[in-house]
Amino acid sequence: MTTAESDIDSVEGRMSTAESDVDSLEGRMTTAESDVDGLESDVTSLEGRMTTAESGIDSLGTRMSTAESDIDSLETRTTTAENDIDELESRITPISLGGTGATTANAAIANLHGVEITTANITYYVSPNGSDANDGLTEDTPFKTIQHVIDILPTYIFHLITIKLADGTYPDFVSFEDFGGTGTISLEGNGSSEATITNVTLSNGLQIVGCTPYMNIKWIAMNSSTSNDEGGNIGLYIERAPSVELVALTINNSGALQTGIGIYALMSAFHTAGCHINNFTHAIRACNTANGAIGGGTINNCTVAFVTDAHGMLQTSGVTLNNCTYEYNCSNSGLAVKSSGALIGS
């Protein structure tokens, strides 16, 4: 019995050991399963990171392609800009009067806008016996018409342009329009002072419209016409001209007596010296902020000598009036200042 009991104890001990071994194996299996789960999770994470990396690589490729396109575009634009600069530089080159180059800052600016400018003072000659096929540069080779000279002038005047008229009658309407610049245009008959009696006649009137150069008209007789932009019977029409000098002009009404206007100015500044105005309804009229200084000369057989309206203003000094019904007519905020300094207005 003792031996049998010992055997039983031995068997029980071995069974207990076996159970412990089984428990240990089960624990190790659980641990192994956890390790496998961890490995599978790591694999999944690695696969996700690889997918993200591949997407990042694709994105970088796209951005590199875009950058290359931008570089190509910039290179194209740079080439275009260089070509534009070359083209502009080629246009800023010295020229003679009436060309398209430039030798001064003002001229350079004008050329960049594709306009013509003056580069030197010049004198043109005109005669009723001349020809517009001549060069107009000497008394022996004069042009025939004043308007031909005006038409060949550059758009921008930065110098002195003198147009000298030989004695005689010029039948065409004369129009100075839309000249820019800060130079001078001088239209001259044969004279030397305010007292000059002119032998030059413009039989169809004259107008100055939209001209910024200093405009000097002197020693000329002219008849009124309806060819001006206003469309009325007017001797000399001035509009949007900031600096006009009128010297020793004789302005006659070619229509019915005491109709029309001798000098009609709108949005302009002008000065007269020794002018004679005959047989108009209004001898001199300034309106729409026009400002005129009237010195010397005579006004003859006119209904009203001086008319201002719409903020126009006239300053008069030493003018002789003969057979005029009224001296002043001021309306709609028009003003006049007499030689004595007295102010007339509405």
Image (cartoon, rainbow, N blue to C red):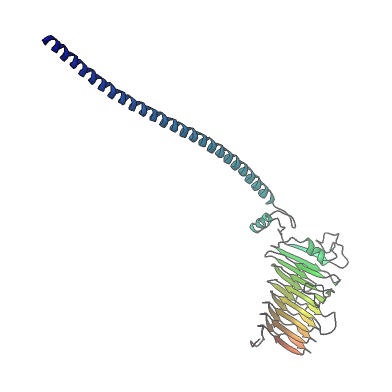
Residue at 75% from the left image edge and 71% from the top image edge: 208
Q: Quadrant of the N terminus?
A: top left
Query: Looking at the image, is 124 positioned above or below residue 58?
Result: below
Query: Looking at the image, is 293 positioned above or below residue 43?
Result: below
Horizontal placement of 79 versus 187: left or right? left
Residue at 76% from the left image edge and 80% from the top image edge: 275
The residue sitting at the front extreme is: 1
Task: Judge whether residue 103 can be spotted in this image.
Answer: no
Q: In which quarter of the view is residue 266 placed?
A: bottom right
Q: In which quarter of the view is residue 207 placed?
A: bottom right
Q: Position of residue 243 (x, y in %)?
A: 68, 72
The residue sitting at the top extreme is: 3
Query: Looking at the image, is 57 positioned above or below residue 88?
Result: above
Identify which residue, 116 or 339, lies in the foreground. Answer: 116
Q: Quadrant of the C terminus?
A: bottom right
Q: Position of residue 56 (x, y in %)?
A: 48, 35
Task: Judge whether residue 259 can be spotted in this image.
Answer: yes
Residue at 71% from the left image edge and 74% from the top image edge: 245
Identify which residue, 19 or 167, lies in the foreground. Answer: 19
Q: Position of residue 34 (x, y in %)?
A: 33, 28
Q: Position of residue 158 (x, y in %)?
A: 69, 62
